[in-house]
Amino acid sequence: MTTSSQTTLGWSRWRRSWWYHATFYSQTWRGTAASTVLFPIFFLASLGIGVGHLVSAHSGLVQGQSFLHFIAPSLLATTTMQMGESESLWPVLAAVKWIRNYHAAAATPLEPEDILTGKLTWVATRSLATGVVYTIIIGCFGALQSWWSLTLPLIGALITLAFAAPLVAFAASAQSDASFTTIYRFAIVPMFLFSATFYPLSAYPGYLRPVVQFVPLYHGVALARSAAFGQGSLVATTCHVGVLVMMSIGGILWGRRSMRRRLVD
């Protein structure tokens, strides 16, 4: 078989894996459609307008923005992070241990790498669609001030992939879900609260700022905020993108090994 034929076959295989997830979601999308649209509205209305009124009354603007505009891009980042987590832990463990539909897929011409690629591509696709909805809603609240805000859906997909890839790899190698709640309680929730999501980095004590900047979600929040406002230096933007890309690549390499060990070896 020629190299061109092998490439075409590989492309076809992972697309079939992606299509499986898309077909499954087409039967269940109604359960998430309302939340995808309503959650950003509720969050922005309650936090941005409600809490924002108190913030404005006591301290005025936050980094030159109203509190509503300040938190709007960060909510897109936190939502796409949580999507990466929710699509990667229990669903993957179920697929390799309980339902075992990944084993069924591995019995076909699909390779474990195709299953992984299809899964991650689907998660990124869904995040991209969610990011479009969020961007439109954020724009309706007047929180978009730059043409760079058009990249917010892509940033959301990158954030999702950065978290989904290592979590899929971990779930594929896990024997039970006992550690999943620990990850959620001591990693996902603290990142949601303490990644400069609801207040700027300058609000932290000096000794904690490097810790916050080390947290992966911080880079997604900062990247989304700089795109929405058209601010941020090229060096900082490159750093934020680089961290998320390295997380994605590292997770993919780990996931390829985990999938093959679980499904074949």
Image: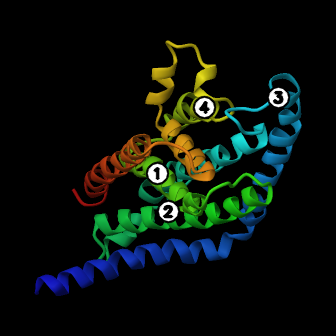
**Viewer-nearest of labels 4 and 2?**
4
To which residue does mark 4 refer?
Answer: 196
Q: Nearer the viewer, mark 1 or mark 2?
A: 2
Q: Which residue is mark 2?
A: 124
Identify the mark nearer the N-term, 4 or 2. 2
Alpha carbon separation for disc pair 4 and 2: 24 Å
Marks 1 and 2 close (CB-CB < 8 Å) = yes
Task: Answer with the quarter of the image where residue 14 lies.
Answer: bottom left
Residue 97 location in percent, x, y? 43, 54
Q: Indicate the secondary structure of the residue bearing disc 3.
A: helix
Q: Quadrant for the N terminus, please.
A: bottom left
- Which residue type carries mark 2? Ala
Q: Position of residue 95 (x, y in %)?
A: 46, 59
Residue kind at label 1, given as amino acid type: Ala
Residues marked 3 and 2 touching at CB (< 8 Å): no
Gap in angstroms between the C-alphas marked 4 and 3 = 16 Å
Horizontal side of residue 237 vs 195, given as left or right: left
Q: Closer to us: mark 1 or mark 4?
A: 4
Question: How far separated are the C-alphas under marks 3 and 2?
Answer: 35 Å
Q: For mark 4, does the 10 Å Cα neighbourhood hold few (<14), some (14 to 19), or many (20 or more) residues?
A: many
Q: Nearer the viewer, residue 229 or 223?
A: 229
Q: Amino acid at mark 4?
A: Ala
Contact, mark 1 vs mark 4 (Cβ under 8 Å): no
Q: Which comes sooner in the sequence, label 1 or label 2?
A: 2
User: Can you tell which mark lies on residue 55?
Assistant: 3
